[in-house]
Image: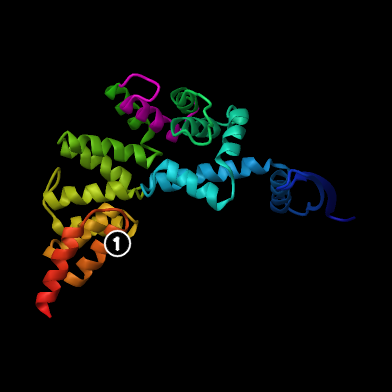
Amino acid sequence: MSNIVNITSQNTNQNNVNKDEQIDIDVTSTEAFRACLDKIFYLNQDPMAIIVDQLYVEIIDLFNKGKNSIPEIIKNFLDTNCKSNYDVFKWLLFYHKDKPEYDCLLGIFFRWNIGTDGTKGNAFQHFQDAATKQNSLAKYLEGKCYEDGWNVKKKRTKAIACFTQASDDCAAAGYALGAYYYKKQKFYLAMKWLQKSADKGNVMALHLLGKCYQKGRGTNFNVSKGFGLFMQAAEGDSPEAQYEIGQCFEFGQGTTKDLGKALDWYKKSASNGIGCYTDLERTRAKIMKQI
């Protein structure tokens, strides 16, 4: 008796045409059987659902690393995948109740007016609804609503509460708390939250944590450790940290002075939007004096 079962799966291709596909299911082992079932599920899944799921994962990854803003991540992803933001928005309007991730994304599209074509919606409500289903990104964005007054009255205490609840899974929330306490000059609290976010790879937290060590704020003065944290953030594409590395190499802060490396890092920082023309010219002048 054969251990292979043949079934027909109907799926929709990229041109929205229904198409039958023959799948052989191997029932000789549990692992093989599960792999076949996963393939059937994938083939029968709505192609737009696959794109939206991938988009959500991309946002979680890049935004929590502090590398891009959410609108930038969405634009880059949809451009790469040749998808219209309007088509994704329309899909989210219809399916946002299916998953908290979709509800969160719909709130994002409303908040930054992505593909909405004038359609009005309450971003705060979508974030809040998704947050009640344990979605950490939505909880963070609910906090941003309270912090900045998006569809709701500003309330700092509620923003802090939301960031705190989201921080276990959302590095951006930990950074928001660290930056808030740093600004308030509560440096010990700032260090706690920045370290938590930095441990998850958030480059903005790494950069600000480096400043704490460079300036001895909330911790012992340690320029070498500050330099190391700046370098981690700079290699993670933080323009601000790239500038700080330029400073470190120019003035020998936490590392050996090296004007050539300083110039290289200032150039990287400038190419990423940091206005450091004066630093570039000063470093070039120093190099010329050594020739």
Does residue 211 lie above or below 132 as drawn? below
| Residue 211 in sight | yes
Q: Depth check: give the residue in front, 178 or 76.
A: 76
Taking the magenta stretch, the answer to whether it contains residue 25 is no
Left/right placement of residue 27 relative to residue 143 reads right
Left/right placement of residue 193 relative to residue 106 reads left
The C terminus lies in which quarter of the figure?
bottom left
Left/right placement of residue 2 relative to residue 261 reads right
The magenta-colored residue range is: 133-154
Does residue 170 lie above or below 95 as drawn? below
The N terminus lies in which quarter of the figure?
bottom right
- The quarter of the picture where residue 72 lies is top left
Q: Residue at x 53, y 26 (%)?
A: 119
Does residue 18 lie above or below 261 as drawn? above
| Residue 255 in sight | no
Q: Amino acid at mark 1?
A: Lys
Q: Residue at x 14, y 53 (%)?
A: 214
Taking the magenta stretch, the answer to whether it contains residue 141 is yes
- What residue occupies the far top of the structure in this picture? 153
